[in-house]
Amino acid sequence: MSNRIETLEFQAEARQLLQLMVHSIYSDKDIFLRELISNASDALDKLRIASLVDKDLSADTSDLHISLEVDRGQRTLTVRDNGIGMSRDDVVQLIGTIARSGTAEMLRKAKEAKDAAASLDLIGQFGVGFYSTFMVADKVTLLTRRAGESGGTRWESSGEGTYVIEDVDDAPQGTAVTLHLKPEDSEDHLFDYTAERKIREIVKRYSDFIAWPIRMATENPGSAEGTDEDAAVTTEVQTLNSMKALWARPPADVDQAEYNELYRHLSHDWTDPLETIHMKGEGLFEYEALLFIPSRAPFDLFTQDGRRGVQLYVKRVFIMDDCQALMPNFLRFVKGVVDAHDLSLNISREILQQDRQIQLVRRRLVKKVLSTVRGLQTDDAERYRTFWKEFGPVVKEGLLDDVENQEAILEIISCASTHDPEQTTTLREYVDRMKDGQDDIYYMTGDSRLMIEKSPHMEAFLAQGYEVLLLTDPVDEVWVERVARFDGRPLRSIAKGQVDLGTADEKESTEPEREQRRKDFAELLSWLTRTLHEQVKEVRLSSRLTTSPACIVGDTHDITPTLEKMYRSMGQNVPHAKRILELNPTHPLVEGLRKAHEQDGSSDVLSETAELLYGMALLAEGGDLADPSRFTRILAARLANTL
Ligand code: ADP
């Protein structure tokens, strides 16, 4: 094989991220070592699993470990593992590009961030991993050989735009990352990363729980007494980390700082978790679980390839990432570890999904997470609000997927409401405030709070002091269709079906008067129903309007326009559901139209007025006109007549 040497460019996004790292003013530069050790640890996990799956893999798994090597003269620090390694293509793909969705978005935000600290904060949330080495090194060399392959690859870059990649014959299995350290500088918070004390301290702080030994040759002066420069120096290889699995220790013996480090390792998030849940299952099926609720949503929460989920261990041995059998999709933001004692080491995802014990564990974990959030809600409103802001939309997906926990999820929901313009409300609080004689929980869905609040449907409810929940997340459109009740009370859309609030006007009028009105309007309504038959299925009188002339409502079981749009955007061909136009009989425009119709029958002018009436109702609820230019033309002509 010829020795291919190439100079390649980093992908644009990777280049931008590197720029941020090279010029970083982040004070906590120590974390680069954590990132490298974390990668090395993952590589060892991967090799162990690969060798279990493929018995023929020619790889040495006899002494899997990480070693840290220092050359003080050259000012280099090498982090070496004998794990899975990378092929040349892997290196180009994994190190030269950032494939994760949300990268562009993250970079845009980082650029817009007010100061460098805020932008670093965003990067921390994203997790830059390997690239963090460029905070402390002006050149990085990576030598790697993929387990099972014969040739290796050498990669080198100073983080400026390009890297050099070359084939090598004699690379050991695994990966060695060598940092050519920048000069030490206390101003810039750069410490001496070749100093044994510094390295020990960092490993202890960030990586103590790593399950593989992290070794380093440490210098022991021959005799402790009378050390002079020439004293014999012996080196001894030491393991720097205790390798203790945090989850296996009694909670009382673990302090929060240790939990936080494990969380960072698992989540690639640089911030502390919002909540830590440490639990143990005893009896027939023993397990330990250590779960974390992050304090902010990752960028990839709503993307397919997002990093997510909990890891499964069996008796301290890592088995798999993102074990979906243990955590449902609607809690995909929960990070952590579940260590089950009685499972086979090479259990497959499929078998796990079927395993009854695993299903039981999952049920316990879900209940525990939900009850933890419930606890926050009652004990720490501030943190609950943070949780809900970050994860509410995801949790609500559970209302569709998890019937068993529907009640528990409904208890922790909060949403905007007409009760308070600033604060959200829980369903429980809503119910406690319900008016005498009110049976239903009223809500309306839509694109924005403002749009819903100002929509004509709201008029009678506001006028009579009924509280309405304002639901604006896309998922709200769907779950309200699935969930019939909360606490025995029906959930009812104010934009659907008939309402019988008894408007002030209705209360004031007597039954014979109302009967008369129905008669008066009967002609107009049936004419309008015919005239607008392409747009609506019926035109009727409304009891939900006080000031607007008209609004459009759905039948109780009709699909809402927003949901219709959502399905369409997902490529599904849903039939268009015609709705109902409701008129406010006390509005001068409606009354005028009635009289005009009585006199003129059905002139073109009147048909146009009908069209305008329908168009206005559509606009008022934030809908889209089918033919906006026609609408404006008719309206402009009418307005011209008034001048
Ligand atoms: P992350 O670890 O967050 O995915 P990194 O930039 O740190 O991002 O690494 C990118 C990828 O490169 C890793 O996901 C892994 O596939 C690969 N990689 C990094 N370091 C190693 C290593 N020591 N051994 C094998 N693969 C590695």
Image (cartoon, rainbow, N blue to C red):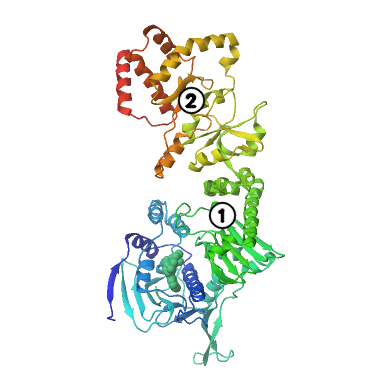
Mark 1 or mark 2: name the one nearer the start of the chain: 1
Q: Quadrant of the C terminus?
A: top left
The image position of residue 167, as x and y in percent, is 32, 78
Residue type at mark 1 is Pro
Residue 482 vs 199, above or below: the answer is: above
Residue 410: x and y in percent read 61, 43
Identity, as a three-letter code, of the amino acid under mark 2: Pro
Among the 4 quarters of the image, the one containing residue 120: bottom left
Q: Residues within 10 Å of mark 1 (few under 14, many from 20)?
A: some
Q: Position of residue 496 (x, y in %)?
A: 52, 29
Q: Residues within 10 Å of mark 2 (few under 14, many from 20)?
A: many
- Identify the mark at residue 328; answer none if there is no mark: 1
Which residue is more in the foreground, 119 or 97?
97
**Label 1 near ligand 1 (CB < 8 Å):** no
Question: Which of the 4 quarters of the picture holds residue 275?
Answer: bottom right
With respect to residue 297, does 268 lie above or below? below
**Label annotation for residue 456:** 2
- Horizontal relation, residue 353 to residue 172: left or right: right
In this rendering, does residue 455 appear at all?
Answer: yes
Secondary structure under tag 2 reads helix
The numbered dot on residue 541 is none
Between residues 23 and 354, which one lies in front from this camera angle?
354
Which quadrant of the figure shows ligand 1? Answer: bottom left
**Considering the numbered disc 1 on the image, is that residue within a helix, a strand or a loop?**
loop
